[in-house]
Amino acid sequence: MKRFLTVSELAQRSGIAASALRFYESRGLIASVRTSGNQRRFHPSMLRRIALIQVAQSVGFTLEEIAGELACLPMNRTATKRDWERVAVKWQKELAAKMARLQSLNDNLTGCIGCGCLSMKACRLLNPEDALAQQGNGAQRLS
Ligand code: FES
């Protein structure tokens, strides 16, 4: 049976501050059990979850996005290779979509540099794909 870790041990081994670990726990990203003295103890599998959180944040996922995906993984055991692959496949698709949006933003930004009109009709940065036109005629943001 694996020995559970104190918050200090988890912080030391993960390189994440204990305060951040408590925040992660409050957001449901990691979980602990309590001793009879009401102290937190963490299953060693939380190290893997923390590593995944760090990686996901480094590529631009929000904590809400990360929490949503981690909620599908078991909290009471070490995630299997299959579990991690499922997360990776989903995040690869989301990353590809984010990269496409960033590329589009970059492409449109080139045309806007030096323009500054911020026109609802002409500016694809301010009104991408003319999304506000689908809400009807006239000024949609003033009502
Ligand atoms: S700022 Fe003029 S088109 Fe975007």
Image (cartoon, rainbow, N blue to C red):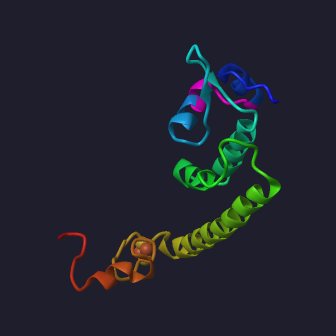
> Which image quarter: residue 33?
top right
Determine if the magenta segment contains residue 62: no
Q: Return the x and y of residue 108 as percentages of the image width and height.
A: 53, 75
Range covered by the magenta-colored residues: 14-21
> Which image quarter: residue 11?
top right
Outermost top residue: 37
User: On the picture, is 83 further left or further right than 130?
Assistant: right
How many numbered badges does the structure rendering display? 0
Q: Of residues 105 and 132, which is closer to you in this image?
A: 132
Determine if the magenta segment contains residue 20: yes
SS majority, magenta: helix
Q: Return the x and y of residue 63 as percentages of the image width and height.
A: 55, 48
- Which residue is painted at 25% across and 85% down in the image? 136
User: On the picture, is 15 further left or further right than 130?
Assistant: right
Q: Of residues 107 and 77, which is closer to you in this image?
A: 77
Q: Of residues 138 and 60, which is closer to you in this image?
A: 60
- Which residue is painted at 54% across and 71% down in the image? 105
> Which image quarter: residue 50?
top right
Q: Return the x and y of residue 122 as percentages of the image width and height.
A: 39, 82
Locate ligand 1 by image quadrant: bottom left
- Which residue is painted at 61% across and 19% down in the image? 35
Q: Return the x and y of residue 10 as percentages of the image width and height.
A: 71, 27
